[in-house]
Image (spheres, helix red, strand yellow):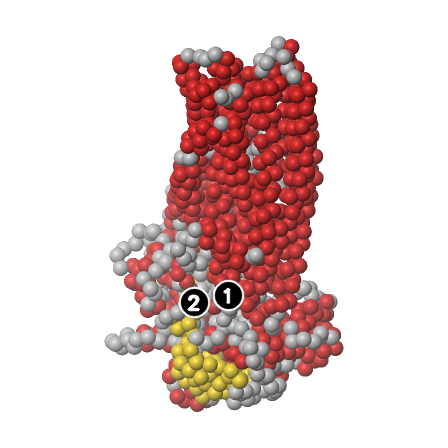
Amino acid sequence: MNVGPALPDDELDGPEEGALTVLRRGIAQTPELKRGLFVSVLFALMVAGGNLVIPIAIQQILDKGVSSGDPDWSFVVKTCVGAAVAMVLLAGLNKFLYQRLMRTAATVIYSLRVRTFAHVHELSIRHHGESRRGVLVARVTSDLETLAQFASWGAVSWVVNATMIVTALSVMAVYSWQLAVVVAVVLVPIFPILKLVQKRQLRAYDGLRTRVAETLTAISETVGGIRVVRGYGQVPRARGQLDGAIDSQYRSQLVARFFFAIMFPISDVFSGLALAAVVGVGVWQGPGWGLEAGTLVACLFLANLVVTPMAEIGEILDQTQTALAGWRKVLNLLAEPVEVIDPATPTAVPHGSLEVRLEGVGYSYVPGHPVLHDVDLVLPAGINVAVVGETGSGKTTMAKLLARLADPTEGRITVAGIDLRDATRADRTRAVRLVPQDGFLFDATLRENLQLGAEATGSAVTDDEIRDAVRALDLDDWLAGLPEGLDTPVGERGEALSVGERQLVALVRAQLADPGLLILDEATSAVDPETERALADALAKLAHGRTTVSIAHRLSTAEAADRVVVVDAGRIVQVGSHAELVAEGGVYGRLYESWLGNTRAA
Amino acid sequence: MTLHQPAADPAHDVVPDDELPPEDLGADDAATGASVTRQGMSTIWRFAKLHPAPFGLSLLGGVLWAAIVVAASYSLGWVTNEVITPAFDGGISTARIWAAVALMVGIGLARGASVVVRRWFGAVTEARMQVSLRKDVVDRLLTMRLSEYRDRPTGELLSHADNDVNAATQMLLPLPWSMGVVALIGFSLASLFSADWVFGLTAVLLFPSLTALSRYFTNRVHGPMARVQERLGVVSSIAHESFDGALVVKTMGLEQHEVERFGGAAANLRDEVVGVARINSTFQPLITLLPNLGIVVLLLAGAWRIDQGAATPGELVQAVALFGWLALPMRIVGFLFESIPRSVVSIARIDDLLALPVDPAAEGDGTGAHLPDGPLGLSFDDVHYSFGSGQPPVLDGVSFDVAPGETVALVGSTDSGKSTLVNLIGRLDEPTAGSLVLGGVGVSALDPAELRQAVSLVFQESYLFAEPVADNVLMGRDVPDGTLDRVLDRARATRFVDALPDGRDTVLGERGVTLSGGQRQRVALARALAGGPRVLVLDDATSAVDPTIEAEILSGLRSEGATMLVVAHRLSTILLADRVVHLSGGKVRGVGTHEELLADPDYAALVTAYEAEPTQLDEAEPTQLDEAEPTQLDEPDGGAA
């Protein structure tokens, strides 16, 4: 069975769009498709032509070659040789057109893939939540793959089969228009029937996919929590739950397979009906219409040439649906407006430490659910501020807005008096630097990771510059201690380095960029004491001479800051120095109390 | 049918998706040759024995289909000779016309019915087999020794239950189809030879050339197609990495750099796809052309034989109809043979898992010893543990006692063996040597169910299930009314749980409902308390809970008389214990009160290090402090939502 678990997909599907709407949107997005369409039709005609050679040859030979009892040998040979030559020629053309077609398809998919990827990076952090990540990856991989597979087979099949049906019916009409009409009438119901079964089948497979995902989730939960399951004597209960999930997957699977089982044979039945109609009507009325035996036999073969493509279209309906769904998802993603755009008339951001103002700033990830309300804050240039608050208080969002990872939905943010929206990306990247918590590194060497940091600002980074930055942060010892120095591979996501070391790398990156506003999202995970000390020192050095906003998770950071901003439920509730706020009590006072609770016990 | 098929699915025109094995190149490289075929056959035999009825019916459907296809060609021949030709030569009876019509309809219905039988029973066999295998795998996951989990990542275990089961059974759909096709070849050749030896000979000449051609191109396209998969993998991993690091990409302005990197990989993929298409563009027209050229030869031969009076036009028509099917067979059988190695590899992986021994402690059989009533003491007697022979010991002769109702803190550095000790108490693992005694009974002799009723373990990584909070706490156990209220209250979880969207019925993880680390730990604690344990073992289970709240919780538990063993990382936690056991390098280094142990410089250093650990502010929930005041009647609203 081929059904994988459905990818986590939080896309709110709008009303189901018809195939044509998706196609129109798709062509608007990728104009190269039009040319591909033209080549497909040409190709289809060649294929159809190739398929018609045989029935025509049979008709010719039966009627003119052998029916008289005295075969016209030169005619038979000529017909056969002609047919062979025609088929070889058409096969050659076929090869050529097929290549063209596939190249176009591959190119279209390629450009769509790259464009989608680029678009994802243009989207603001609103779209980059933890839960969305899998969905975004799916868009540029599996969703586009369904489209690629469709392009290399289903799409061509549609055109070829449709052409086949039309040409086979046309040739039949040349022999006998009456028989062509009979065949068409008999076969018309196949489409609504196939469509109906297909629809049920799709629904059944959707259900199956859901069940498969449920089974997998249930198993993975049990595996993940196996110590709890075992430690709490829950094995029988877990077995009951899992067996239940497996059984319900089985039932869904049988429903889906039922439609699979009856889908294809429908065309067998119709093929029988069509042949019966041709024989019945042909034999009964044929002589009156002036038909000949060979023509009628040819019509039998032609009737099959109509049924088979119909069945094939039936078979690809579901692939078509999947591909259209994938395509629609990709197009919807591309249609997501880019919020953070470079200004048409940018204002340059000065070098040196920056004054920062938040004026009535509000932000909501989901409209109607603001996580920040009406935040007003003025940070003089060069100040060192700690922002504290509980998880979910909105402090991290505030940091992200400062780096323009998204634009505030209300109010504005200025640095050195310039609205962040009026600065170019390059300027902003240079002047404002957010050092995120996770210290994500690319799977490359340390040097490459550090060079990346400044590459974007326009200049190549030399080893000397890197060493200067390292020295400025007093991290020479740390760098010297790495097994291969700057050539040390950092591993996937930087995981060859410790959490603390990754943070050090992030700090060196920031030092290289030399920003006027530094935003630090302090890591929550503990690091070993030695690295902790190095981090604290490097941070202090890096912060020197810059406006620094630290999203503080530790009271020691708050204690050391010039000013503490306390955020609660999306609002600033207290601002002041550590000492002032302790005296003031309130939210900060309680945070402080609870911190003391730990050490006082000693 | 001369339609081109894509490389990824080379028989699409004749075979519905699901009867084909999923394309997976490379996986079958490891296992090839006669032994694989033999193993494949034995796997099929194993499936057949388990579900003989649907399996047999699916094969019957396949063979029936072949018979009907050949019968259909005969009937075409018969209609040509006995109905069409005479009809144009002077007319025939109406009865005969109706007979011909009925024959055509009947053949169509019968062919359809045979396909339904083949597919449906094939699907039933497959589905039932999957259920059998999946339940076996799940059962083993639930009952195997937990030490087996250590070397197996979750993803691997999941893939046994998912991919491996699917792959192992995937041949069950192409199998009856292939059987039918093999039968079709036999029937066709017989029928062609019986019509005329020249027709038969033409088929015999055509058939091997098709097979050879098919094999040749399959081999040629194999490498490029494997590379397509590889390059797709690169594209995918760049997308993963790049989107994972989206924040870094944004903060450093690396968008363009990333697009170029991804674009390069996507271009490589495109080139390889085009390469495969180029090979296919030669193969596909050829594979269609050959049978058609065969038909031309047949027509020539037919004209000659008809002229000689050795064959009739009807027999020629019949032969032409059969030739149309000849391009199909070898490809279908080929798919079966491609799917066999994958099935064999997967079934072997499943069997490896199923061969693992069952842990007798996983479930009780009710035969074990029972515990006395009242508070329980716990003693460790020269307990040893190591992960395997030759491995350094994790526990190296640990002995100490915990008196009934006593609270003991277990303190030690990261590798001191604390968590292993905890696992042994819950019999999640067995000591290599030595014994644990609970309430005077050896832990290994106890009925596991009774052990788990008496002892509750709470782990540092508080694992919660994607179920309602209430289910997470009660876990379907038979508990007195009011237990949920009581334990949530005891674990100081009432306030935040009731503030969740659906209160206690809130499904965790749904609609973005997440709990902070401290909240999760408190729910896990409530779960432990719900069983009414007489011994409570906390493995750093309150590490993310605010110290003030932790102190309240722990002193509350202490006053209830349960025996407690607490693995502690915080000074405040240690101070709540009656005695402290200091574990170092798998040995007990000291036992005594905190003050007594401070005389040991190692212990003092360890505890000082704990003190210096940064406190995280996020966990502090100021309003929870209010809750601690029992006299306060009107609780302030808002705040810690």
Quadrant (top left/top right/bottom left/bottom right) for the C terminus of chain B: bottom left
User: Three-letter amino acid code at disc 1?
Assistant: His
Q: Which residue is painted at 68% across and 22% down in the image?
A: A77
**Residue B580 at x, y percent in the picture:** 48, 68
- Residue at point 66%, 24% (across, down): A80
Q: Which residue is mark 1?
A: A128
The answer to whether residue B166 of the structure is visible from this angle is no
Query: Residue B384 appears in which quarter of the rendering?
Result: bottom right
Label 1 sits on a secondary structure element that is loop
Pointer 2 residue = B516
At x 50% / y 65%, what residue is drawn?
A: A128
Answer yes or no: are tags 1 and 2 on the same subunit. Answer: no
Q: Which residue is nearer to you in this view: A2 or B577?
A: A2
Image quadrant in which you'd find residue B603: bottom right
Q: Nearer the viewer, residue B434 or B178?
A: B178
Instruction: Please give the chain letter of the residue carrying mark 2.
Output: B
Q: Is residue A238 visible?
A: yes
Nearer to me, B528 or B506:
B506
Residue plotted at (67% across, 51% down):
B271
